[in-house]
Image (tube, grey):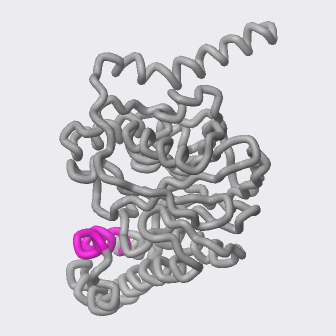
Amino acid sequence: MPKQTRSSTATLILFILLWAPIQLNAGEQKAGPIQASYSAEQVAPSTYVIHGPLAVPNPENQGFMNNPAFVIGDSGIIVIDAGSTVQVGDMVLEQISTVSDLPVVATITTHVHGDHWLGNQAIAETYPDAKHYAHPAMIEQASAGEGQSWVDQMRALTNGASAGTVYLPPDTTTDDGAELKIAGKTFRIFHDPVAHTDNDITILLLDDSVLFLGDTVMNNRVGRLDDGNFKGLIAFLDRMLTVDAKVYVPGHGATGDRQVVEDFRNLFDTIYSTVAEQYDNGLADFEIKPIVEDRINDIATWTDLKQALGKLVSLAYLEAEEDAF
């Protein structure tokens, strides 16, 4: 096939892949904007974070729950994890406009869970020339069903407050060791085979010494681990603790210092090591759970920890069982 024809075909396929969701949902009326007031907090000279609520998506928070961030570059804005719905993405753009009139030139998405990236729709609609970066596995999974699944979940969990949201998978890949130079800023990318998912990236903004952790770390909140595993997550967090950053932005919860990483790592290490120890002692997972509860009693008030603990203990038990064979 001639080179020009092959290139044209590839472009057409990419267009269909990225924009077909809009055509399929074009008749849906867009729900109203985010009602609560959120402000962008400056956490470093060129970096801002909009800290979302800690609760799971619901009608009251209209699906907003993560920590969208943006970096002001020399010639444009870079958004990291634009949020869960087109309404959240619109809110992020509104907050950007309060501190800069530069265009958004790129987004970077930390992983496939839609509460972090469905907001890219608003950015793509307002700035169609922006590039959208993510790990290759994230793009593949988002295109193969995860994107629509998250759109449907958000609509159901918010009683329609996310209506009008469609999924637009990122269009540009990045992976471990890459350095992205965007609008005069340099972003170093980290990825391990598995952590919170198999497609997590964390992002170090070298200019401000800010590490964006996605859901490999949460502050005062515990999330699911269905798409990752304990040993992989703990190993990745050990790696993140070797990164020399000044500011650490978790996927959920308040921005802080390296203690945010240490606390989250210690929680998951305590759960896994306790389960593995008691598995060796012959206990069943339901017998191990009270022992784990006792050992993490000092952080028992973390959001969703009580609800999530049974599932986490079961996952740790299956992982310990697998390691035994």
Q: Main secondary structure of the magenta part?
A: helix
Residue 171 x, y percent position in the rendering: 61, 33
Screen quadrant of the C terminus = bottom left
Question: From where the camera sits, is residue 199 visible?
Answer: no
Q: Is residue 263 above or below residue 29?
A: below
Determine the residue positioned at 51% across, 50% down: 81
Q: Quadrant of residue 148?
A: top left
Residue 251 x, y percent position in the rendering: 47, 62
Q: Is residue 263 magenta?
A: no
Determine the residue positioned at 61% across, 14% down: 12
Give whichever of 57, 94 is nearer the camera. Answer: 94
Q: Quadrant of residue 211?
A: bottom right
Screen quadrant of the N terminus = top right
Please give left or right for residue 15 compared with residue 34 in the image: right
Question: From where the camera sits, is residue 152 visible?
Answer: yes
Q: Is residue 304 magenta?
A: yes
Q: Is residue 191 above or below residue 246?
A: above
**Number of labelled discs?**
0
Q: Is residue 60 above or below residue 8?
A: below
Determine the residue positioned at 52% across, 59% down: 49
Determine the residue positioned at 68% across, 73% down: 245
* Residue range (magenta): 303-316
